[in-house]
Image: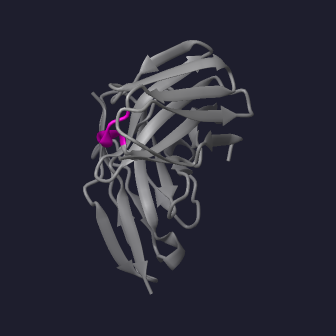
Amino acid sequence: DAGITQSPRHKVTETGTPVTLRCHQTENHRYMYWYRQDPGHGLRLIHYSYGVKDTDKGEVSDGYSVSRSKTEDFLLTLESATSSQTSVYFCAISRTGAYTYEQYFGPGTRLTVT
Amino acid sequence: AQRVTQPEKLLSVFKGAPVELKCNYSYSGSPELFWYVQYSRQRLQLLLRHISRESIKGFTADLNKGETSFHLKKPFAQEEDSAMYYCALSQGGSEKLVFGKGTKLTVNP
């Protein structure tokens, strides 16, 4: 599992409240990612990080912010949750394989915004 | 822009039948392609990478640059193959992946 954990694993929150999801890795990988998974859309990249305090936007970054103050932790924050952000959120790391980068995923966080 | 298309949202086969999950991509450079599998309510797992030309759990996938395809095949499907399958593309050594929308495979007994 490439030493990736996510917390919480499940969360129900109300519209308008802030929510922070945590991704933790134990193998000191440089690259980390946040995706959301929705039926009919597959996986879409929200934000990614290429080092401590180095982050960039992905395909669906509106309404989300991230922070990475330590190599091992990558936080995703929904500043004011909306029902459209109900989704399963996956964190991933990128590990260099024999020839290329390969991504490995955390177990996911199921977020419901009511 | 790079794009990955999986034309089938759902695919249903019987145990022992051959299965092919289609993946087409658009990218002008040298792509690197992957198949990921997600069993029910589990994390995504890397199944295959085109560059290593391997066979994992009986699955193979060949990159066809002429047809811009990377279809996943297995000659004899098993019930435990039932899962969600995602095709993904990385632009030549990039650390970012673009995913298709996925195909849900159901293998019936």
Q: Is the magenta stretch mostly helix, strand or loop?
A: helix
- In magenta, the rendered stretch is A81-85
Whether residue A25 sits left or right of residue B102 in the image: it is: right
> Which is more toward the observer, A8 or B32?
A8
Residue B31 visible in the current orientation:
no
Q: Which quadrant is home to the C terminus of chain B?
A: bottom left
Q: Position of residue A28 (x, y in %)?
A: 72, 27
Please determine whether, in this image, residue B33 is positioned above or below residue B11: above
Residue at coordinates 54% horizontally, 47% vertically from top-left? A108
Would residue A94 be counted in the magenta stretch? no
Q: Residue at x 57, y 59 (%)?
A: B55
Residue B79 spot, x, y in % from top left: 50, 78
* Figure colour scheme: one colour
Q: How many marks?
A: 0
Please, which residue is most extreme toward the bottom here?
Answer: B109
Query: Which of the 4 image quarters holds residue A68?
Result: top right
Residue B17: x percent and y percent? 41, 80
Determine the residue positioned at 56% across, 27% down.
Answer: A75
| Front-lying residue, B62 or B59 | B59
Left or right: residue A30 compared with residue B34: right
A83 magenta-colored: yes
Q: Nearer the viewer, residue A87 or A49?
A: A87
Quadrant of the rendering where the N terminus of chain B is positioned = top left
Residue A45, image x, y percentages: 41, 33
**Quarter assignment of residue A7:** top right
Viewer can see residue A20: yes
